[in-house]
Image (cartoon, rainbow, N blue to C red):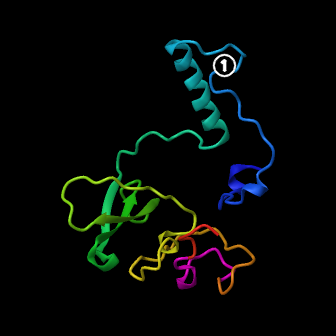
Amino acid sequence: MPASAQLDGNSDEVRVGAYTLPPVLTMANGRPVTDARGWRERRAELVRLFEQSIYGVAPAPLRQQRYVIDEQGAAFGGLAVRRQVTILLDGRRDGPQMRVLLYLPAHMTGRVPVFVGPNFHGNQAVAADPAIAITPNWVTPPPASAKAAPPCSRAGSTRRNGRSRRS
């Protein structure tokens, strides 16, 4: 099944077909990896496999990219700061963009680690927080079994918190 057909992934191990992972320390031509030089060659092969089969090739960095903090407020009873940021990929509000939702510790200063969770459902789908902006972008249609979800590919308040846990 192509990756594009698996937008929601699979959380049911029973549905995983039989497969055998290729040996990591064996080159595509069958030669074993026995030293650091061989590993650098094998690593390059593995990166190409991921580019061809899973992730694609990362584009060159954009030069006009801008970051706009759209909203910032207290969350989780004051334990966190919610920050909603729009990344303007070409620097223009009417150009391509990506929305990022951050929950940062409220009483920390300096850098803190973050988890990145890209999704095809919009940030409003990851938590019940009513302050999360509903994405104006296209979202993955809900499964046919979803109740009360609109059949279109636009998010609405009925899609809030719909993907916060595995089902």
Residue ranking furthest to the bottom: 148
Report crowding for label 1: few under 14, some 14 to 19, many 20 or more residues within 10 A (C-alpha).
some
Which residue occupies the foreground of this view, 19 or 163?
A: 19
Q: Describe residue 64's horizontal placement relative to residue 24 as left or right.
A: left
What amino acid is labelled 1 in the image? Met
Q: Is residue 95 visible?
A: no
Quarter of the view holding residue 46: top right
Q: Is residue 152 magenta?
A: yes
Which residue occupies the foreground of this view, 19 or 54?
A: 19
Q: Bounds of the magenta span?
A: 150-161
| Residue plotted at (67% across, 72% down) | 141
x and y percentages locating residue 154 in the rendered image? 59, 76
Residue ranking furthest to the right: 18
| Residue plotted at (51% across, 58% down) | 118
Give the residue number, with chain letter if any, for mark 1: 27
x and y percentages locating residue 158 in the rendered image? 57, 84
x and y percentages locating residue 48 in the rendered image? 61, 30
Q: Describe residue 20's horizontal placement relative to residue 63 as left or right.
A: right
Count of marks, rendered view: 1
Q: Is residue 11 above or below residue 145?
A: above
Q: Is residue 144 visible?
A: yes
Residue ranking furthest to the front: 14
